[in-house]
Amino acid sequence: MGVDLRDIEKRWQEMWRENPLPSPVKTDDEEKARELAEEAASEPVDSLSESPTSEPEATNASSESLPISPDNAAAANGDSGFGDGLSSQDGAESATPVEPDAADEKSPGEPTSTTESSEVTAEESAAASEEKPPRRRRRRGPRTFFSLDMFPYPSLDGFSVSQLRGVATNDVVARYQQSRGKRVLRPIGWDAFQASVEEEARQKEISPRQVVDQGVELMREQLRRFGALVHWDHEVDTSDPEDYRWSQWLFLQLREKGLVHQDDAGWKVAITDYAEPLHSGLKNLKWPPRTKALQRNWIGRREGTKLVLKASSELYDGWEELEVFARKIEALPEASFVVLCPEHPLLEKIVDPIQENDVRDLQERAAQLDERERIANRAESDGVATGAYALNPATLEPIPIWVSSYVMPDIRFGAILGMPEENEAHKDFANRHGIPLTGAGGNSGRRRRRPPRRRQGGESSDQKKGLQGSLESRGLTEPHIDYKLHDWVFDRQRFWGVPIPMIECDECGTVPVAESDLPVKLPDVDRLEKVDAGENPLASFEEWRAVDCPSCGKGALRSVDTMPDWIGSCWGHLRCLDPRFSEAIASREHLQRWTPANLCVGGIEHAELHLMYVRFVSHFLADLGVTPRQEPYRRLFNQGRIRSQETANDNEAEASRRGPRVIASEYLDHYGADALRLHLLFMGPPQDHVEWSDEGLKGCARFLQRTHEAISQRIGKGKFVSRNVLVAKHRLIRRVTRAIRTYRLNKAVSAFMEFIKLLRGDEFSMDEVDKQTLRTFTILLAPFAPHMAHELWEQLGEAGPLTSESWPEHSDELLQPTEVELAVFVNDSLVDRMTVELEATKNQVIDQALELNKVQERTGGKSADRVIHVPDRLLKLVYSQGNESAEETPPEEPFFDPNS
Ligand SMILES: [Zn+2]
């Protein structure tokens, strides 16, 4: 039955436990002195910019500890970055050859138009490459690589397989970077104030502290047993008072800069003040385009016009002014209605008495919803007529004013000008509520078909000028940039969170806690009592609440609100650099060297809000001068969720939230770490959602046993290396390296499987597989299955540590093919494959294909109506008769890996 994988893993885990990884952040004094001298000699750093010239400051490290190998030197010269320009999308990768200098290699400071367009064509390329090293780097020794996992939340269930999928992905990249001579930092943080912790504590009737302590202990052990590369000196627990004091400090700083305000609904942080930098900063980030699109959409930057309308109602005496935002002023004649937010001050004045009750009901309902619920309700947005109307300034026709909870008070003046002709959502709203289209597009409710827009282009622009001019002269418009983004609701009414460091005094009002009195610690509890909904749990801790007012000294009360769940992980990655530093979040020196993080891996569910807040905090800390970089993570990778088979059919919205988790511990126990790692990586491209399957996991365990057998049998047997073996080896290097660079880690696993199949088959004799080939295989396997790789390395009799081996490079020359296999399609069916000379012309290839028996059977040798030829990949003969539809894009099937 083969070797016992768990025995192997246990032995190596013991070894690693006894020899924990030394911190890569600490430097000895000599090194420090040298760096300081170099820094002094170099140009001053613009502390807020991310320009390439400031980059070297973040990248120096000891040249003694990791010598520059020829490979590393090449990398330092800029000839090969991480994922240098390799597109990761299958289609793009195979249909169009991608130049090594493709646009995603742009350094952050360069113009962005190409970066932007490359996002569209090479979808995940953003996730795949490393910044271009500046010229001075070589002199400075190995570069740093700060590789971050989004902080997992502690749970007594331990990790889910989805979370470990992210860890495994990050681990492969980190180990690969290490092999390439980078000084890698891989910290770990626990997002311990998550609401789920409080829920778990209530369910189990213990304290949240116990959930965190026991959960973290379990999950630490799981990471060790998973073979994850973790620097345990860089561990952060966001519920540790010495850690969350910095969240409170951050709150006081935000308040001092005028970014915090309190209204009836609670504390809010004016993230809206940062809308523009948050929008423009996106273009410099190598993040997945999907995530960037979500962020852009959330910010919702729009250029347009601010418009002042006159509003009134039947029984109202006089006119009120109402500000709205219009994107296209020339479409103004079509404006058919206005929708106000329930909080709009105008409502108190102009609502028609008949509608008053309805409006008040809606206002009360809206007050029960939080902002996310209100926005999520968009599709079935409620709506009530106010009976009031506004005058369309273009037509002077009255248009009705409505209220809906979907409209938020701090977005676009809390009002929407309904343009059903321009906007689908507006049209839906009008249809749903039977609002007649009174503008140019409609006549007493009946739609008139308008001529196509393009034909009236000239008229439209004249119209715009005329309209704009007349409105401007009446003082009714001004240019305006608007953002959908709204302020950050900063308080939660939960026990388990960071207390907001404010004090309510009868005499002095709301007073901040002095910085020297931080942290404001949570009260200790043995277990959480049941709390009624709507009640603030901290309010019942009267002793904790009572405090002397810092201003007048009289008795006062602490704020009982706590901060958002994930506040700690908004800046926690900085804290990881130096978790025990007591003077600031982290020392200037470490921030300078290690930020921004090179890579952050986490679930796609964080793509909108969480990442927006992380970026906001990062920009704010940069403005304060705390950190030298505005953006937190240079590169981001979002792994897809793993759903259990039972829930895979649930609706997407449910499944994409936290949903039921597949717990990892049982699988880790039964199959071991390496099998689980390979399975998680092999399930599909790591960014895709997949279904969990036990079968695949068993297959990976079997593969590891075969690997052990195949390598062990050949150790000491090889006498030389044949050309075939050499080609197979270099092909493996190329496939695995490319797979890592493009985050298609599943392809690396299949490359390993195919290689082991070759070793086990009859193709290679015992003599012709030399030790070097086995060594190379083991080095490549190490990031994926570290335990097995270390075991094989030892069996190979290697003395040096596997982790300090450099990453192998393939030889292009050796892999230069002279001929290539093409898949031949007739319409949409794959009918045959054929081998053609690389130099063959399109016509030669077509002639050769028409000779094939299987093609003749289908076509009678007739020439095709249209031919799609993707050199190196496929030939598609399209015949237009019959029932097939001549598709432009070839089907998915033929896009196999070019190296296979
Ligand atoms: Zn006072």
Image (cartoon, rainbow, N blue to C red):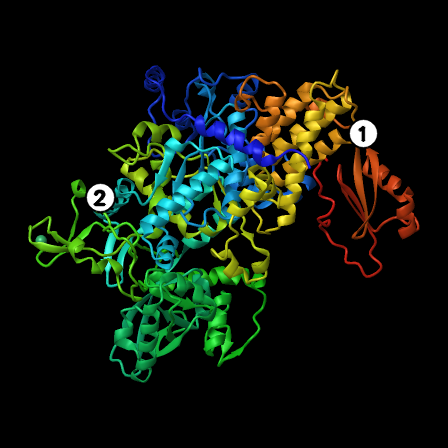
Residue tagged 1: 762
Q: Residues within 10 Å of mark 1 (few under 14, many from 20)?
A: few
Quadrant of the rendered image containing residue 579 = top left
Nearer to me, 632 or 688: 688
Identify which residue is drawn at 50% across, 28% down. Answer: 132
- Amino acid type at mark 2: Pro
Q: Is residue 289 above or below residue 504?
A: above
Q: Is residue 319 visible?
A: no
Question: Taking 824 as reference, is 654 above or below it?
Answer: below
Asked if the residues shown at circle 2 and circle 1 are in contact, with their CB atoms under 8 angstroms apart, the answer is no
User: Left or right of 112: which side holds 811?
Assistant: right
- Closer to us: 108 or 175: 175
The quadrant in which residue 340 appears is bottom left
Q: Which residue is mark 2?
A: 519
- Residue 485, position in %: x, y? 38, 55
Q: Nearer the viewer, mark 2 or mark 1?
A: 1
Labels 2 and 1: the sequence-earlier one:
2
**Mark 1 belongs to which amino acid?**
Asp
**SS at mark 2 in the image:** loop
Q: Is mark 1 within 8 Å of ligand 1?
A: no
The percent coordinates of residue 41 (x first, y second) are 34, 17
Residue 543 visible (yes or no): yes
Most distant residue in the bottom direction: 354
Q: For the residue carrying disc 2, how many other residues have a C-alpha within 10 Å: few (<14), some (14-19), or many (20+)?
A: many
Q: CA distance from mark 2 to mark 1?
A: 68 Å
Depth check, front residue: 389 or 275: 275
Give the secondary structure at mark 1. Answer: loop
**Is 648 on the left or on the right of 422, as rendered?**
right
Give the camera-side residue of 435 and 751: 751
* The N terminus - image quarter: top right
Residue 803 in the image, given as x and y percentages of width and height: 53, 24
